[in-house]
């Protein structure tokens, strides 16, 4: 009888059931990685510089607050400081933004005369509702 109990103990196998919870899906990313602003139509000063310093202004990276995460349907306020370097006034006639973004409002309203010095422009944009990482492409149309 002792031999039989030892054999039974050796043959006994424990079955362990491990339940594994499914891994949650990664959170959808909604972010703006940067903004590129094209100052279209501007001329040059008597010293050869563009009226607003550069033809393109590009903002990205942590120092400029990007990437910027947002909730779908949330509008984003983008402040831009323009420096008009010419000695005469110039006009910003309009602002447009490339899809999939939508331009909600601009302050100041355009057309706006810009005298030499700084001008703060605020764009309110609606970013895409689909998940992803995006760069906003804005065009400011400038004239003399």
Image (cartoon, helix red, strand yellow):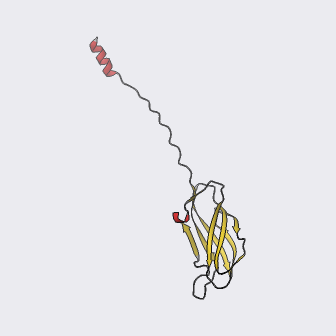
Residue 21 visible within the image: yes
Residue at the image point whose x is 47% and y is 36% from the top: 20
46 relative to 19, above or below = below
132 relative to 93, above or below = above
Location of residue 18 by image quarter: top left
Q: Position of residue 10 (x, y in %)?
A: 31, 21
Q: Position of residue 32 (x, y in %)?
A: 58, 61
Task: Work out which residue is located at the far top of the displayed protein and give it.
Answer: 1
Which one is in front, 5 or 77?
77
Total label count?
0
51 relative to 6, above or below = below
Residue at the image point whose x is 52% and y is 65% from the top: 63
Task: Work out which residue is located at the far left of the displayed protein and give it.
Answer: 3
Residue 61 visible within the image: no
Q: Position of residue 24 (x, y in %)?
A: 52, 43
Which one is in front, 115 or 46?
115
Classify residue 99 as left or right of residue 6.
Answer: right
Classify residue 137 as left or right of residue 18.
Answer: right
């Amino acid at each position: 009888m002792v031999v039989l109990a030892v054999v039974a103990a050796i043959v006994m196998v424990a079955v362990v059931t491990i339940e594994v919870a499914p891994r949650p899906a990664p959170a959808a990313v909604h972010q703006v990685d940067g903004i590129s602003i094209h100052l279209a139509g501007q001329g040059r000063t008597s010293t050869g510089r563009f009226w607003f310093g550069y033809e393109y202004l590009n903002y990205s990276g942590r120092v400029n607050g990007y990437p910027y995460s947002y909730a779908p349907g949330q509008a984003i306020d983008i402040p831009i400081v323009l420096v008009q370097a010419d000695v005469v006034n110039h006009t910003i006639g309009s602002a447009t933004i490339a899809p999939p973004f939508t331009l909600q409002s601009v302050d100041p309203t355009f057309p706006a005369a810009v005298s030499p010095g700084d001008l703060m422009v605020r764009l309110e944009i609606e970013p895409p509702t689909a998940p992803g990482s995006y760069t906003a492409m804005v065009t400011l149309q400038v004239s003399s």
